[in-house]
Image (cartoon, helix red, strand yellow):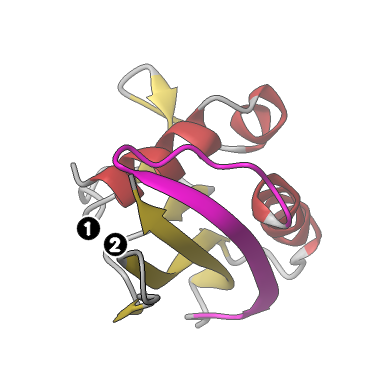
Amino acid sequence: MGAVTQAIYDRLASDSVLAAMLAVYRGRPAIFTAPPPGDAPYPMIVTIGNVTDDPDDTKNSRGREVRRDIGCYTKATGSMADLEAVAERVRQLFHRATLAVDGYRVWLCEASGPVLGETDQTVYGLVVTVRLRMQEV
């Protein structure tokens, strides 16, 4: 798992409030950093790869600006209230937070959303986007 993925996973999985809102898969909160297995239960979180990963260098340092979507999903029940609570918790965990990413000093961590994600008659989705600006150490 890459350093950014690991940092995001660790933040999500270590929060007991969020864990209590999610299903359990193989003894852990249903948080996936790859496509979830077919037997994965809802509600779940899926975060796969960066949406953007751009250089953010200065004259004296090498940096990156990364945006990562964190998708929150649940079975369609006619209400998105529980899903909204999950997505809002994800936002709280990242917006203006201190995040440790191995090999970098993160100097900005922001969260935007949640906004509507994949939604159909069987599954509802909301997406929170995390923006990281960081310098290599």
Q: Please indicate whether residue 97 sits to the left or right of residue 104 in the image.
A: right
Q: Which residue is mark 1?
A: 35
Can you see residue 24?
Answer: yes
Q: Which mark is residue 48?
A: 2
The answer to whether marks 2 and 1 mark residues whose Cβ atoms lie closer than 8 Å is yes
Crowd class of label 2 (few under 14; some 14 to 19; many from 20; radius 10 Å): some
Residue located 72% across and 29% down the image: 17
- Looking at the image, which residue sits at the far top? 27
Can you see residue 30?
Answer: no
Q: Is residue 81 above or below residue 65?
A: above
Marks 2 and 1, Cα distance to the nearest angstrom?
7 Å
User: Label 2 amino acid?
Assistant: Ile
| Comparing labels 2 and 1, the label whose residue is closer to the camera | 2
Residue located 26% across and 43% down the image: 39
Please provide percent x and percent y for residue 100: 47, 37
Residue located 65% across and 52% down the image: 94
User: Label 1 amino acid?
Assistant: Pro
Q: Secondary structure at mark 1?
A: loop
The part of the image, by quadrant, that contains residue 9 is top left
Depth order, front residue of 129/88: 129
Please provide percent x and percent y for residue 67: 44, 73
Q: Which mark is residue 135?
A: none
Q: Please indicate whether residue 81 sits to the left or right of residue 3 in the image.
A: right
Q: Which residues lie in the magenta part?
A: 96-117
Please provide percent x and percent y for residue 72: 54, 60
Depth order, front residue of 110/63: 63
Q: Is residue 113 in the magenta section? A: yes
